Image (spheres, grey):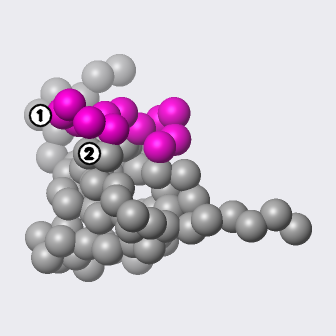
Amino acid sequence: MPYEEVYEVLFTEPAARDRDRLDPVRRASFDKAVALLARDPYTEHSRPVGPGEQDREIRLTSQIVAEYMVSRGRLLLVVLRIFDDADILLVED
């Protein structure tokens, strides 16, 4: 069985607070997405933010966008943007 590198996942304090506020269903989806990201932080679904490749952004779920940094086997989730469909002003058909 080939070795698969899994990056250590760390959170800034604000990102950890946002993660901890997720309801159980959204938290389970978030955790699954982060586990996938830890196996491939440069996935084609992510994009660089800024001049280098190590600062990135990805839509983890339909309602959660994460900004993160990759360095030396670590993945640091810096900012989470969490959207809630309940607060949409104009619902599109």
Where's residue 88, x and y in %?
17, 38
Q: Nearer the viewer, residue 1 or 86?
A: 1
Q: Which residues are magenta?
A: 42-53
Residue at the image point whose x is 36% and y is 33% from the top: 47
The secondary structure that dominates the magenta segment is loop
Question: How much space separates mark 1 and mark 2, taking CA atoms?
Answer: 32 Å
Q: Taking the image as drawn, is residue 55 in sight?
A: yes
Mark 1 lies on a secondary structure that is loop
Q: Nearer the viewer, residue 13 or 4?
A: 4
As drawn, the residue found furthest toward the front would be: 72
Check disc 1 and report the residue beneath it: 89
Q: Taking the image as drawn, is residue 25 in sight?
A: no
Q: Is residue 48 magenta?
A: yes
Check disc 2 and report the residue beneath it: 55
Where's residue 61, x and y in %?
42, 49
| Residue 77 in the figure: left or right of residue 4 | left
Q: Amino acid at mark 2?
A: Asp
**Badge 2, how many Cα within 10 Å: few under 14, some, many 20+?**
some
Decide which of tag 1 and tag 2 comes sooner along the chain. Answer: 2
Position of the N terminus by quadrant: bottom right
Residue at the image point whose x is 41% and y is 38% from the top: 46
**Mark 1 in CB contact with mark 2 (< 8 angstroms):** no
